[in-house]
Image: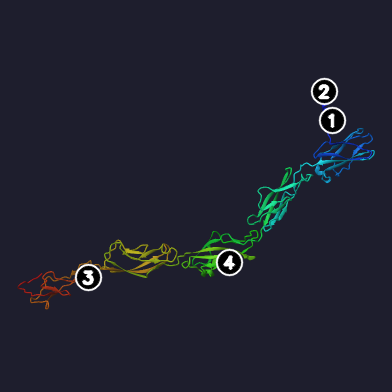
Amino acid sequence: MALLSISLVLACLHVQSVWSNIGFSKINCTAGSNAFVGSVQEEYQGDVEILTNIRPDDRPELDTYIYPNGVTFLELIYTVGDSAAVVRTRKPLDAEELKQSGGNLYYSVTCSNTEKRNTQTLEVLDVNDNPPIFQSKSYSVTVSENTEVGSDVLKVTAEDKDASSENSRIMYSILPPVPDEFEVRADGNIRKKQQLDYNRVHQYIFTVEARNVGGYSDTATVTITVEDFDNLNPCFDHSLYKASIEENQTGPLSDVTPEAMKAQDGDTGINEPVVYSITAVLPNEYQSIFEIDGDSGVISVTSALDREKSDHITVYIQAAQQDDASKTASAMVSVTIEDVNDNPPKFDQDEYTVSILENSPKDQLVLQIRVTDPDLGGFSKGHFVLDSDTFVINSQGVISLMSDATLDTETRDSYNIEVIAVDQPDDGLISTARVIITVLDVNDNHPQFLPLPEHIEIQEGVYTSSSPGEVCMISATDSDSGENGRVAITVYSHIEVFSFRADGTLLAMDELDRETQSERV
């Protein structure tokens, strides 16, 4: 009893599966018929229609002519002698294969005995089951940077095989990061939104997405290469350059900073050659001695410069586009004239005369001489040489008495010294001057009497100032010079009797009487 119950359940399930269908039709083998079976979504599999009223001799057959041509979705399940038949799918229904017929599947069941057709129409409803597909996975185009804003530059195309217009409708977009310069239109045209600048961006690469209403999508890569347009002037890498050259030299400038002078076409994608020229030189008097190579931009000096006349010169240069001289760029070159030790030091006098007292203290300052040097740094690194064993000179030109020297007019009353100025420690240039030092006398010596006889005799008699008697000549010397060496002799005793004449003659001025006094001291 249990086994019987199970069999009945299975039989019921089988009948339900077999007879699940879309429509029912009575076959008309007498006149034929046209009927609408119904609607079903694509991907359907199973019974489409149950045909009834079949007589034994009707022998129905599924017509091989089915529209659209070549589309064989169906088959007829019929056993001879049965009064019913089933039209069933052979594979899932696909609306995309029925686009040609507007989504309708037409088929016919023909009665073999009468050859009458029963033509049926089945509407297959589209399901959004296909993603959009780009015709190409990559698109590329070259666009001039001066293309007008608003122009379409490229079109991307995707297809959606879904049958209905709604399910196959495609929406295009650019995936982030989105370039500001482009947008994609609803029809797939990529349009220029903003002005392009080749020097800023040479190429744009972005991703375009095609998406349908069902959320299916596909992507493609778009590459837009910007073509440079000749709309910019040349430009120097820097507005200010610094360079140098040694005085007395000719040739190219050296030590150019921050780098070698160079200009190039502002339209770097075209990079038209430029021609260099000098537009001005300040001070203007140096205009003729600077030249520039038109191709390389190298600036040279054609005549020697003197730093002592000008230590800085400014050269203004220009770069003009070779094919359009109206397109130019300018820069300034600051040229430093580097010093060369080409000027000897110069004394402020060729000869110096000075006086100093004898017996002056040690290290006594005698004279300060001054030297100038027009070369850079002046005489700051120079030194003096003094050929003397009595005097010394320091780096400031101060001449002073040596600490172990003594001046004595009576020994030497003047010095004629050569002083040499040397402007560099090594290989310096020199100049010479004379220093004449006079040692001034100081009254530092006592007068000395010349030797006298032990006894001096004079005839006694009466002498007066008007008629003196010459006793003898007394001489004295003084090593000092000039007024300091002049000696005056006077009498300190017996002044009423004796006196001296200016020439040193001792005179008796009063009566001398041997009997009264025979000797006087």
Q: Residues within 10 Å of mark 4 (few under 14, many from 20)?
A: some
- Judging by the rendered image, the residue that carries numbered circle 4 is 277
C-alpha span from label 2 to label 1 = 19 Å
Tally the marks: 4
Using the image as rendered, state which of residue 444 and residue 3 is in the foreground: 3
User: In the current view of this chain or complex, which residue is farthest to the left?
Assistant: 515
**Label pair 2/1, CB-CB below 8 angstroms:** no
**Label pair 4/3, CB-CB below 8 angstroms:** no
- Judging by the rendered image, the residue that carries numbered circle 3 is 485
Of the numbered discs 2 and 3, the one sitting upstream in the chain is 2
Secondary structure at numbered mark 1: helix
Residue 61 image offset from top left, x and y in percent: 90, 38
Residue 3, disc: 2
Residue 208 visible in the displayed image: no
Residue 189 visible in the displayed image: yes
Q: Which mark lies nearer to you, 4 or 3?
A: 4
Of the numbered discs 2 and 1, the one sitting upstream in the chain is 2
- Judging by the rendered image, the residue that carries numbered circle 1 is 15
Q: Is residue 256 left or right of residue 443?
A: right
Of the numbered discs 4 and 3, the one sitting upstream in the chain is 4
User: In the current view of this chain or complex, which residue is farthest to the top?
Assistant: 1
Q: Which mark lies nearer to you, 2 or 4?
A: 2
